[in-house]
Every structure is written in C-alpha cells, then in structure tokens.
Amino acid sequence: MGKNLQGTGLAIATRFSGSKFAAKYGLRKPAEKLAYLGTKKGFELVMKQMAKKKKDQPDEKMMLDAPARHTMFDLSLSEEQQMIKDTVRSYAEDVIKGLGHDANEAMNLPETYLQNIMELGLNYFSVPESAGGAATSWSPTTNAIIAEELAWGDFTLAFTTLAPVGVANAIVKWGTASQKEKYLPEYLGESPVMSAIALQEPGAFFNPMKKLSTVATKVKNGYRISGVKTLVPFGGDASLYLVAARYKGNNRLFFVPAGTAGISWDAAPAMGLRAAATGTLTMDNILVGADALLGDKSFDYQAFVDLGQLNWCALAVGACQAALDYLIPYVNEREAFGEPISHRQAVAFMIADIGIELEAMRLMVWRATALAEMGKPFHREAYLAHVLCAEKAMKIGTDAVQLLGGHGFTKEHPAERWYRDLRVLACIHSGLHL
Amino acid sequence: MINLEVPKKFRALISQAHQVGNSVFRPISRKYDRSEHAYPVELDMFAAIMDGMNDSTGGVAGAGALKQDKEKDEEGIKNGSNMATVLSLAELCWGDVGLSLTLPRQGLGNAAIAAVADDEQFARFGKKWAAMAITEPGFGSDSAAVRTTAIKDGDDYIINGEKIYVTSGERADCVVVWASVDRSLGRAAIKSFVVEKGTPGMEVVRLEKKLGIKASDTAAITFTDCRVPASNLLGDPEVNVEKGFAGVMQTFDNTRPVVAAMAIGVARASLDRTRQILNSHKIKTNYNAPLQSLTQLQAQLYRYEADWEGARLLTLKAAWMADNGIPNSKEASMAKAKAGRTANAITLGCVEMLGALGYSEDEMLEKWARDSKILDIFEGTQQIQQLIIARRLLGKSSAELK
C-alpha cells in the first residue's frame, strides 16, 4: 500500500523531529511532533484559516473552495503560511542546498531526489481534500512562498520539484471531473510522478500568446498532435506531459503520455537548469485519447501562462534571497586594504540595491498571486512582476558573481550558478503552474 | 492574509486628492513654474476646502496626521493615517509636486511635530503650518554636524545659526529648527525646536532659485539670539548619549515614505501622459507579449511601469509598517531610494521618448522631469538611503561603513 497522507506526515515529522524548526515551535514531545504539518491533524491546522464553507454544487467533488476576499492591505503571513515557509526552508537548508553543485555538474538529478522530497508532501497542498489531498482552497500565494523557499536551496532543483506539482495544480484548477479522477490519485501515491508542462517552442522570439506551432486536430478516437517543445525537464524520463498546442483557433493543453507512439526526446542542455536535464520533445503526428484535452471551454490560457510565469518569478525571488544571504557574510569577512570590503560604499551600495530590488520583486509577485487567489483579474500585475523579476534577478545574479570577484567566476561558489540559472527568467514561458 | 490592494475605505480620499491634482493644481501648474516665488493665492481658498475634505474623509490624511500607530483594529491589522497620507499625496503630486509642497499645514515640520510632540505641544502647534529647518550652509546629509546652537537661558532657549533649503520657510507659520543644546556632546545634543514666525531674531534672508518645484518657496533663514520658550523643544530635553539622536531621526522614518509617495505621483503623471501620446501614434500597450517581441518604446514603457509598481508597493509596505507600529527604518529608506531613482529615471526617460515634444514647454513632461529631481535628494539623498539600507543589511555601524 502506498504512503497515504498519514504516512507522509509521519515521514515529515520524523525528519524534522530533531530540527531547529521543531524547537522553534516547541514541538518536543512526540505527540506534538505528529501534530505538526504532516499528519492529517497537522494539515487541518495548516489549512484551518483557508478553510471555507463547502460550495453546494453538483461537481463539488474534487473542487477547491471559492476564493477568500481580503479587505485590508496586509503583508502578514498567516500562521499556516509561516509554518509552511519554515518547514520548506528547513528542508532547503538541510537537503537541497547541499545537492545543487553536484547535480549541476552531473546534469541530472540525484538518484533519490524526487523520491526523497515526497516527504514534504507538496502534492497534498495541491490536491483537494475531496480527492484525498489536504487542500481546501487554492492559494497561489502559499504556492509562491513554497517555490521561493525551495529555490533558496537551489533554483534548478526547485524547478524539478515543482514541475510535477505544477501539472497537479493545473489539473486541479482546469481539469474536468474525469481528468481529476484519472490523474490526481497518482500524485498522492508513494512514488514521484515524473511529469511536466511543455509549452515553450524552440527558436527566437517565441511568444506564448501567439499561435503555437504545435498543432492539434480532432480525429475519430481523440486528437492528433504535431510539434516540438523545448526546455522540457527530466531527460526524457517523464511519464506524462501537459503539452500546449493550437486547437480550433485557441492555444490549449493536452495530456500526452510519454509512451505515446511518435514521441521522441533529444537532450538539449542550456546555459542553466542543467540538473533538470532539459531537452526537446518532438511529437510527430501522435495520437492521444479523447479525454486528452485539459479542461473545457472555461479554460483560460492567459491565466495558465501567467500562473507559470509567476511561479518562475517566485523561484527567482528565492534564489536572489539566497544570493543576498550568501553575499552578506562574504563581503563582511573578505578583507582588502586592511578592512572588510563591505566597509566600501562601492560594495555596500550594491548590497543595498540587491536588498531593495529583491523586496520589490517579492511584493510584485505577492500582489499578483493575492489577486489570483481572490479570483480577481491579475494579468497586468503578473506581466509587470515578470518584467521586473526578469530584469532585477539577472542583475542580482550578475552582481553576486561580481561581488565575489574571481571567486565568483569559479564553481567553488554558487554565484555562477545563479548567474546562469536566473538568466532563464526572460527566456522561458513554460514548465510551471502555481 | 497577504493582500496588496488598497482598501476600499480609501477610495473617496484618493478620488478627492486626484480631483484636486487635476482641477486645482494642473490648471495653475505652469503658471507658478514660470513665476517662481509668486505666492499661489489659489491655494488659500483651496486650503479651506481641504480642511473640509479631510473632515469628510475622516481627517486621516496629511503630514500632520503621521504617527507611529500603536492601536490595531479587530482583525489585528491597521490601514491608517500613514497609508492614507501616502495615497493622497501621490495623487496630489500627480497634479503638481511644487504646489503639493506648498500646501498650507502640510509641511515636513508638521510631520516632525506629529511624530514627536507631546499632547500639549500638539495642541499648540498641530493646526499650524510648520516648515522643517535642518540643512545649513556647512552640511547637508551629515545631520549630526549641526552648528546652530540652542543655549538654555532660564525658561527659554536662545537660538543662533543659519538654516538653508527650508521648504515653505517663508510661508509657514512656524519652523521646526534642529539645533545643538551643547556642541561638546555631539549628535545626542541635537534637539528640535518650534520657532514661530515673527519671533524676534528670526529672519528669512533669501529665497532660492531652483531647477524645479518652483511653486514651493525654499528659504534661507538666520537666527540671531532668537529666544523661544523651553516648552517649544520637541521630545525629551535630556541629552542621552546612549540614545544618540534617535528621537529626531525618528521623524524620517515617517517622512521618507511620504517623499516616496510624491515621487510615485509625479512618475505616474509622466507615464500616463506618455502612454496617451504613444497611443495617439498607434503604439499600444496591452501586456500581451514578451519584451523581446516588442518595439524598444513599448518595452521601455513596461520596464518603467514595472519599476514604478515596485516603488509603489515598497512605499505602501513602509506606510503599512508604520500604521502597525512595526519599526520601518530600513523599509522607509528602501521605498525612498527606489521611488526617488525610479521617478527620476521615468520622468527624464519619458522626455527622451518623445523627443522635441517631450522637451518642449508645450507639454508638462519637461517640468515633471525637473520637479522629480528633488525627490531623490531631500529627506535623504539616494546615496544616504543606500547607506542606511546597507548598514542594516550588513550589520555595520556608521563608524564602520562610512
């Protein structure tokens, strides 16, 4: 029998029972440890503020509740968000941070990485209670906080962690009842579901809002799809792709099982995201089933793209925070001309600017996710958040290398990885979903 | 719960301030840009109207209302006078920065009084128009270098010294003056005093001619054996070397987001007008393509708008912290630094985008580009904000990181 919610909770409780996190919340007795995050009881605690009255609709099963409306300008994390943030940061610090360097060099994930990170139970936050998960309402802000904290450990490993979660989120948000029934149970199983959204197409000037080159047509038993997708993670080992294609004049998403005849995979390493083993996915007139089209007429492709871009932005915020946290002790300890280099304004002002722009990035992301969470239009805010994050994240990645000088140029320090990884913000429109 | 939308309760206030910016300030904006030092008589009538408006919207806005709020509402979160002030001031400055600065009873001295005055002083000075006098010919950013002295003499202090760059120094009812009660004790001895207009020994000796904000008078004032009652000293009269001059610096935590808000206002004026002109040339912005797929003009406009939004949110954050009694020194400086440089870049950039039209006095863009520069200078320059932020982030003292 697969690990259920209770089992996942127990695993998390075990992992963190000795951590400083447990001490912080006074979770010392075993019973208290069980009450924290992972158990059913813990999830209830985490979700209690998000919990709203169940909607009285026929399709209530596997639906998330209506969004909450907030009236005040507020930047306080809920108690639940703070706990989730601390838990994920703790995992990022204890586990992910130490794996980034070697995974980048190996151009692959550590063998048990995706299996191990199942302990965090992230899929449970996506899947509604009625479908066996722990989510009651959709919180893109909480998802952004999770993304930020994972990426604090390592940008690319965070991407690979969240790629399958993104597929689950997309199914929950857009999927039909039968699609939820078909796919969601897998995400609550014992093994990771290697899956990814594939939207990006190769070549210069790709615009996700224009007509995609990948085309789907309706045929008797389903859909025929042809096209090429790039920057797809998991080195061809994924079992399921959510592929964007032009269909009846609109851009839509299709479930494409990796084993479908006519699919081929080619490794296509890039400047960054190397641990994700990116590649191109070629679909040569493949045939997928009649239930392959994600969602129905209410599907909002613009929102789908925006939620992906915001997820990348949240990853960038996390990596930039990691860069700042790395640079501060370095410039305070590194001496030149008899004193720490941080005593020089030329250095100190770069640190100040990282601090300023990083906070602006975070606020921009939160503004858009909070709007999405309340069910309000958020396209302009998502677009501007991405414009700012793409520009400032690259600047921060560049400054991180510069502040470390020659050391920054070597692989002894993570700065060169931030430099390469953060460049992707302006170059990708694919792969994630809050 | 995280939410960065402005609450509905401020809509009336924002709308009123916008109407003022549009219908009171904009029509006379160029007039007082051209006739520097002429007193904008239209504002006297308007000040009376504004008192009424403040009452009708709860009286929450304005420099005099800025306080570190300690009380919270039932939800545990407060959106109060600091937020109301930055929101309304941004709208006023969308109209005209110089005229906003010369609004009666909205001086930075009013902010200082609100921040540190006791109840008795607030009763005496709260309704007066108060300017702020810090800078001297010998120093600017280095506020601890004050040379003006205030020597205790019986129940009075006797003030001697010269102050420059006093915004509304001629028009205000009183001036909040920074002076040292004992120069041998360093910065801890710096106190602020309210000096009422007409006090013997106080003299406005010059009005500056400036690059922008010409509607606002900027005065040089001398104090020669100027005698003020000891009860006009704001805050604690004791010199506490341990505490330094935290008391007077506290004012800046409240006023920096206010200046940031002014920068946001004028920057939006430039963005709005530039977008309008570009639209009339069939250059549309609808947020639907990556920057790579756009023209340079469109991409630049989006970059400006993104920076502007970032500055705006940092400013709201700083105000939100003040409203909720959370120390916001670093965040106030972040807001000021980001908003100041962003407004400068946007207003100058918009002039460039439109070429000769932007440069011409036929449009207000060139004026906004001149007005905006001061917002990256007063209440602490860009570089002073960076210094404050860097010290906080790096854990450095002012002796270590100079």
Image (cartoon, coloured by chain):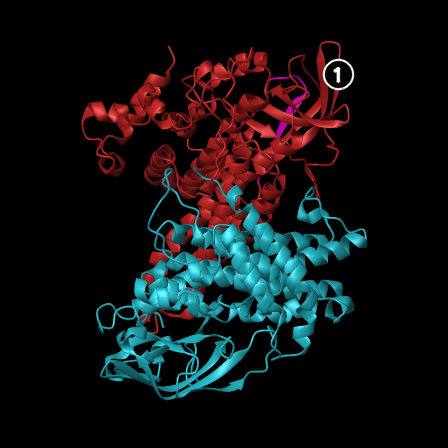
Chain colours: A red, B cyan
Q: Residue A224 vs residue B139: left or right?
A: right
Quarter of the image with the N terminus of chain B is top left
Total tally of numbered discs in the picture: 1
Residue corresponding to mark 1? A218
From the viewer's perspective, is residue A158 above or below residue B310?
above
Report helix, strand or loop for mark 1. Answer: strand
**Magenta stretch containing residue A262, yes or no?**
yes
Q: Residue furthest left?
A: A29
Residue B253 placement (x, y as % from top left): 39, 61
Residue for point 22% across, 31% down: A27
Residue B333 placement (x, y as % from top left): 43, 61
From the viewer's perspective, is residue B82 above or below residue B355?
above
Which portion, as a residue range, is magenta? Answer: A259-269
User: Which one is nearer the viewer's eye here, B50 or B32?
Assistant: B50
Q: Chain of mark 1?
A: A
Q: Amino acid at mark 1?
A: Lys
